[in-house]
Amino acid sequence: MDDDILDERPDELAVNPSLAADSSLRLEQARHALLKLPENLRSVFVLYEVNGLRYREIAQTLGIPINTVKVHLSRARERLSKLITKESTKEESWTKTCNS
């Protein structure tokens, strides 16, 4: 890729501060939700999504069956989705209250 192309396109977060703030808020919500997960679900999620390990590697690392890894990953994703949605709803409600 040509370096000149990168210089021509401004960074969206630098151009739009509200986008940067929203991105920062979402990252904080995700981190907070991740910390609320039980350790067994969080460990599998982090090893898979953050560290990029495969199911078999996670199973060996944690000493659990591959099917358990799959179940924990699915449950972690489901709970994270619910927690983040719940946090977003609270944030929207708070923002509406402050703006009233």
Image: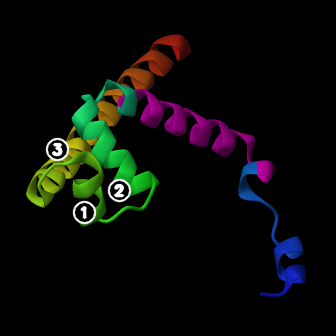
Q: Where is residue 73 in the image (x, y as percent from the top left)?
A: 22, 50
Q: How far apart are marks 3 and 2 (CA)?
A: 13 Å
Q: State the residue position of label 3.
A: 75
Toward the bottom, the furthest residue is: 1
Amino acid type shown at disc 2: Tyr
Residue 82 can be seen, yes or no: no
Q: Which mark is residue 7?
A: none
Disc 1 or 2, which lies upstream in sequence?
Answer: 2
Q: Distance between the residues labelled 1 and 2?
A: 7 Å
Do labels 1 and 2 touch, CB within 8 Å? Answer: yes
Magenta span: chief secondary structure: helix
Residue 21, magenta (yes or no):
yes
**Secondary structure of residue under mark 3:** helix
Q: State the residue position of label 1.
A: 55
Start and end of the magenta stretch? 14-33
Q: Quadrant of residue 55?
A: bottom left
Indicate left or right for 71 with 96 as reference. left
